[in-house]
Structures are given as structure tokens and as C-alpha cells.
Amino acid sequence: MLQPLIKTTTEPSRKGLRAALAVVLGFSALLPSLDAQACAACGCTLSKDWGTQGISTTPGFTADLSYFYINQSQQRIGTSSASQAQINALAAAGQEIEDYTTTRITTAALSYTGDTWGLTTNLPFVQRTHGTYGAGAYPATTSYLTSSDNSIGDVSFIGRYTGLSADKTAGLIAGIKLPTGNTNATFNDGVTALDRSLQIGTGSTDIILGGYTTGAIDTYGWFVQGTVQHAVATKSIAGADYRPGDAYSLNTGMRYAKFGSKFSPMLQLNIIHRRPDTGAAATPPDALTSGPATGGTLAYLAPGIMARVGGGTSVYGFVQLPVYQNVNSLQLSARYTLSLGVRQSF
């Protein structure tokens, strides 16, 4: 069973504080690009794999069901919102102007935590809708296309080793993402293939490597975590290859442990740098500069809260707010993202 987050004394014990820290860590961005490999401007940088950070102090299983929402409707170029003049210039040069992308992800995760190792399986169900004016057609709607796809996404298996230190405050992460998601969706005309970067599955087998460390200052717990995700095998469709760009994540956060074991306010800073996608099926380069049209660097401030409702059950919620966005070419970004979930320890 999940151990109490802190003891109800003035000064929490080391064991209790370590468990409290683990709650914060579990929400850090272990899997920043599993749910949203498609573009730099996606904000999927919160993890649902609490066991990655050793949330269970004794061996056992945990199940987690989470919901993620992101609505990308803001046009951005570099670090600023795109002006109408910039959009018009790109459209006149023949670049595709996308209108919106809305993604909803429901992920079921099952974790096992041992003494010094653990394993988490993540099974996402992805719902994505998209609209685009097409290449060179904006602002006319004569070539406007939409898409809607709902299916199982890319399954991942994440292993963790917590034996780097005697108190388990440092560990290693290693995992694999499999190409189980759909890569054959089309637009509403039934003929035009949806961009590879917008398909529910990336079509690639990826490895994930990383590490973390934790600590405490008085009643505040902190963590630092870093991961890298790299595609080691890709799948071509109709002879066109596609490789999603590598994703590098650095996350730090803190938790205030003075409210007892029922409520845990948290705050994270999630940073992700995504390299441009490559291959014949990747998004074409910028029509004016010939530079990449995917990839970029994002930073999100994410306040959240976790509440224990009894019987080994916890509920949680986070809102991610962008504090820095620097994207290549013209990309859609979100003004916020929302994550909600429930977790059960056995």
C-alpha cells in the first residue's frame, strides 16, 4: 500500500518526507514526447508514472488513469505570436497554414515497484482533431481540410533503478516506446493522408534514457530530472520515411509538505527541447527561409495538487502554463494544458 506522505508531527521523518517527495517527482516529465511527438509546441511534459520516482516505499502494484487535454490554436513564429503579415507572407510563398489541433489523451498505466527496481506500462488512447487551410490557400477555405482520429497510441515500457543511493533519492530511467499507434489516418476527403507528424502513432521505436535526484529543505521537497528520447527504428509509408526529432527534457519542481497527508500543493518547471523531424514524409521546410518547420524549445510552469481520498486512492490535477516558447517556423501552440488523474495502490 502507499505509505503516508508525511507524519503528522511538526517535523516530518526522513522516510515520510522521501515518500512526499516521490509524489512530486512522479509528475515530472519522464514521458514528454510519448504523448505528443508531433510538434515542438505540444505541452505533454507531465508524467503519469509515479513509480518512476519510487512513490511506493514497499514493493507492490499501482494503477493510474489520467486524462490530458491540449488545444493548439495560437500561431507562433520563434518566440512571439505570428503577425497577420507573417502568416500572409508564408501562405503566399506556398506554405501550409494550419488552423488548430486538439488532442485528448486518456492513459492507463500499471506499475510494479520492487526494492531497487520498478517497471511501468503505459497504454494511451488518443483522440485528435485537426484543421488546415492547406498549402498556399490561406485565407480561402476552398481547400480547407479536417481530420479526426481516435485509437490506441504508442505503448511504452519504462524501467527504473533506484539503487544509486542507500536512501533511494537518486536513480536511473530506461525505457522503450513501441510503434503501436495508427499511422494511416486521412483527412475528411478520405483520400489525402494526414501529416505524419499529426498521426496518433509516430511509427518509430524509441528508447528513453534518463536519471533523477531528490532532496529536501525544511518542509519543501525538490527534484531534478532529465530524460532523452531517440528513435532507433522507423517505418516508411508509401516509400516515404519519417523520423521524429529527438526530445530532451529537464524538469525541476517542489512540494510544500506542511498541509499533512491529505493535500499536497506542487509546482513544476518543465523544459523540453525537440529536434526537427526528418525524412521525406516530415513537414516541409519553411517556405521563406528553407529552415526546419518542426522542433523548438518550450518551458512550462505547472502548478498542481494531489489529494488522498482514502483506501490507497489519490486524485491529482495540473495546469501547464507556457513561460517560454521558441519554435521553428510557423507552428500552432497552446495557451495552457490540463492534466487530471486518479491513482490506486494495491
Image: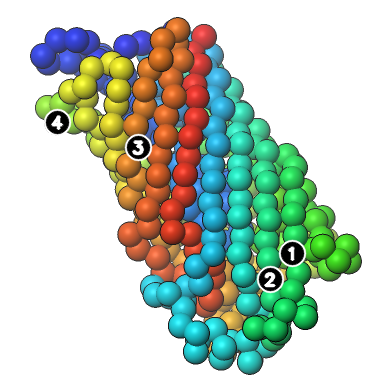
Relative vertical location of residue 306 with respect to residue 298 in this rendering, above or below:
above
Label 1 vs 2, first from the N-terminus: 2
State yes or no: discs 3 and 2 in contact (Cβ < 8 Å).
Answer: no
The amino acid pointed to by label 2 is Thr
Relative vertical location of residue 85 with respect to residue 232 in this rendering, above or below:
below
Crowd band around label 1 with a 10 angstrom C-alpha radius: few (<14), some (14–19), many (20+):
some
State yes or no: discs 3 and 4 in contact (Cβ < 8 Å).
Answer: no
Q: Secondary structure at mark 1?
A: strand
The label nearer to you, 4 versus 1, is: 1
Label 3 vs 4, first from the N-terminus: 4
State yes or no: discs 1 and 2 in contact (Cβ < 8 Å).
Answer: yes
The amino acid pointed to by label 4 is Ile
User: How far across and down, in percent of the image, does residue 176 sit?
Assistant: 61, 39
Real-space Cα distance between discs 4 and 2?
A: 49 Å
Q: Secondary structure at mark 2?
A: strand
User: How far across and down, in percent of the image, does residue 112 sit?
Assistant: 54, 18
The residue tagged 4 is: 217
The quarter of the picture where residue 130 lies is bottom right
Relative vertical location of residue 34 with respect to residue 64 in this rendering, above or below:
below
Label 1 vs 3, first from the N-terminus: 1
The quarter of the picture where residue 264 lies is top left
The residue tagged 3 is: 304
Left or right relative to 52: residue 243: right
User: How far across and down, in percent of the image, does residue 204 sit?
Assistant: 70, 51
The residue tagged 2 is: 132
The residue tagged 1 is: 146
The quarter of the picture where residue 25 lies is top left
Label 4 vs 1, first from the N-terminus: 1
Real-space Cα distance between discs 3 and 2?
A: 33 Å
Label 3 vs 2, first from the N-terminus: 2
Real-space Cα distance between discs 1 and 2?
A: 6 Å
The amino acid pointed to by label 3 is Gly
